[in-house]
Amino acid sequence: MTKTKRILPLLLRLLALGANIAGIIVMVTSQDSTKVLNLTFNAKYSNTPAFKYFVIAEAIASGYSLIVLFIPSETMLWHFVVILDVVMAMLLTSSISAALAIAQVGKKGNSHAGWLPICGQVPKFCDHVTGALIAGIAAAVIYLLLVLYCFFYVLKPFSVVKP
Amino acid sequence: MTKTKRILPLLLRLLALGANIAGIIVMVTSQDSTKVLNLTFNAKYSNTPAFKYFVIAEAIASGYSLIVLFIPSETMLWHFVVILDVVMAMLLTSSISAALAIAQVGKKGNSHAGWLPICGQVPKFCDHVTGALIAGIAAAVIYLLLVLYCFFYVLKPFSVVKP
């Protein structure tokens, strides 16, 4: 790999790391409370398994991004990085989709199941979750770009398999 | 590609197609009703956006699997198939995760948000959704295997980039 070809993926990895960490911080700090009939209800991310999964997945991706930054450029390990990038892209997509599905019920509710929306009661919580999801989506898109980059520039498919 | 190398991905694609179609049929036929205070409530997949997304994603993947079966073996189009396989794996993972998150609320509820579980009232509906999710997970795993296969055998990464 030439030097310029190394800078773009490095930048993408740093951006993904930033987006992942932002997603974790915004999700973990999401908290709001509401009073119903003198009882206080607390809304926090850890009450919902999908949001916990989101934080865990973002943490795994952050750790992976950090480790990859320290892999020396001239090693066979990079072949596995391509596969792991695909796995990370799938993990991030999965966690975002799960969190998004729950956030949608929180926002709109589901009248057929009798689940009422909660965003009217705990707007600050919902704003935080929205922010975390946007950061998560950004990280997933960056990972998809990394996979495409690796595919087109590192593996050079068009010069490998001849029709 | 040799003939044996072509048979395995073909088999995997047929399996993925079968799993996708099974997932769609089982999800679309999921229906159950319950009587509460003389009022009948119907549970069906189309009442939940996440389940509709699941059916749409499985349908897209089925259509894609079908088209790919008819691509002649000696064409440059196969390079894009590798990328599209990654995209399909991500799409399937995303739709399964969203449906799974909602199914979890349907099964266990979320006491903090005041969402009650509904599987006790509509067990047949929940069984169908579970079946559809298992088929969907199978399809996603097959797509991941296809991506790994393409990576290791078609692109031959270990012979391309030398350390």
Image (cartoon, coloured by chain):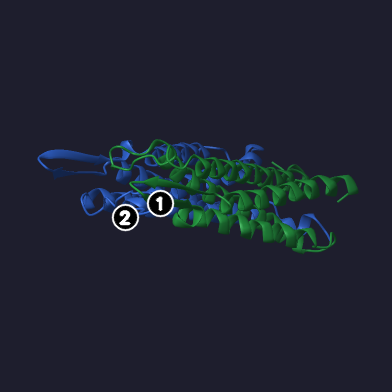
Chain colours: A blue, B green
Q: Which mark is residue A107?
A: 2
Write down the quadrant of residue B63 in the picture.
bottom right
Q: Secondary structure at mark 2?
A: helix
Which residue carries the number 1 mark? B40
Q: Which mark is residue A11?
A: none
Q: Residue furthest front?
A: B38
For disc 2, the chain is A
Q: Residue furthest right?
A: B3
Badges 1 and 2, same chain: no
Q: Is residue A154 visible?
A: no
For label 2, the crowd category at 10 Å Cα-Cα, with few meaning under 14, some 14 to 19 and many 20 or more, is some
Q: Position of residue B53 (x, y in %)?
A: 51, 56
Residue at the image point whose x is 65% and y is 46% from the top: B139
Q: Residue furthest left?
A: A38
Residue at the image point whose x is 64% and y is 42% from the top: B138
Three-letter code for the amino acid on which mark 1 is drawn: Thr
- What quarter of the picture does the C terminus of chain A occupy? bottom right
Nearer-the-camera pick, A121 or B124: B124
Q: Is residue B21 left or right of residue A15?
A: right
Q: Is residue A116 left or right of residue B86?
A: left
Residue at the image point whose x is 50% and y is 53% from the top: B45
Q: Position of residue B49 (x, y in %)?
A: 45, 56
Q: Is residue A41 visible?
A: yes
Mark count = 2
Q: Secondary structure at mark 1?
A: strand
Three-letter code for the amino acid on which mark 2 is drawn: Lys
Q: Are marks 1 and 2 in contact (CB under 8 Å)?
A: no
Q: Position of residue B26 (x, y in %)?
A: 61, 48
For disc 1, the chain is B
Q: Give the Cα distance between marks 1 and 2.
A: 26 Å
Q: Position of residue B10 (x, y in %)?
A: 80, 50
Residue at the image point whose x is 54% and y is 40% from the top: B127
